[in-house]
């Protein structure tokens, strides 16, 4: 992982965690469904931004290292697997 990726990832994870706690409280309080859904959509977007950060870091570090080390097939297999999971 790139040196600047981890702190940013942790920051985003803390945000997501706090947001989830807020949604849980909203559900416990029987808040209006549309308000809860707006918050879950915001969480989904935050997770997508986290995933984009992680994939960017992976492409610029692990993938480059793997190719330089001659592990092109393994690296490509992992990327194909990630693509398949994301496409579901």
Image (tube, rainbow, N blue to C red):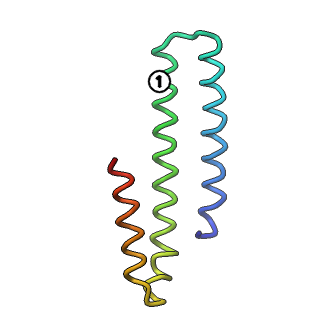
Q: Is residue 8 left or right of residue 74?
A: right
Q: Residue at x 48, y 53 (%)?
A: 51
Residue 78, percent across and down?
42, 69
Identify which residue, 23 or 7, lies in the foreground: 23
Numbered disc 1: secondary structure: helix
Residue beneath disc 1: 38
- Rendering quarter of residue 79: bottom left
**Is 83 placed left or right of 17 in the picture?**
left
> Where 28 sits versus 43, above or below?
above
The answer to whether residue 82 is left or right of residue 23 is left
Q: Position of residue 10 (x, y in %)?
A: 66, 52
Residue found at x 38% / y 72%: 77
Query: Above or below — where is 2 with respect to 39?
Result: below
Q: How many marks?
A: 1
Who's the residue at 51% across and 66% down the image? 57
Residue 45 % position (x, y)? 46, 39
Graded by Cα atoms within 10 Å as few (under 14), some (14 to 19) or many (20 or more), the crowding at tag 1 reads few
Q: Quadrant of the N terminus?
A: bottom right
The residue closer to the viewer here, 73 or 26, is 73
Q: Position of residue 41 (x, y in %)?
A: 45, 31
**Height in image: 21 above or below 5?**
above
Q: Residue at x 50, y 29 (%)?
A: 40
């Amino acid at each position: 992982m790139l040196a600047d990726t981890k702190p940013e990832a942790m920051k985003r994870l803390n945000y997501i965690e706090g947001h989830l706690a807020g949604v849980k409280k909203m559900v416990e309080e029987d808040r209006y469904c549309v308000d809860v859904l707006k918050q879950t959509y915001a969480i989904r977007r935050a997770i997508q931004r986290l995933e984009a950060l992680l994939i960017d870091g992976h492409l610029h570090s692990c993938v480059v290292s793997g190719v330089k080390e001659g592990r092109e097939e393994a690296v490509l297999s992992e990327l194909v697997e990630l693509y398949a999971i994301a496409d579901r």
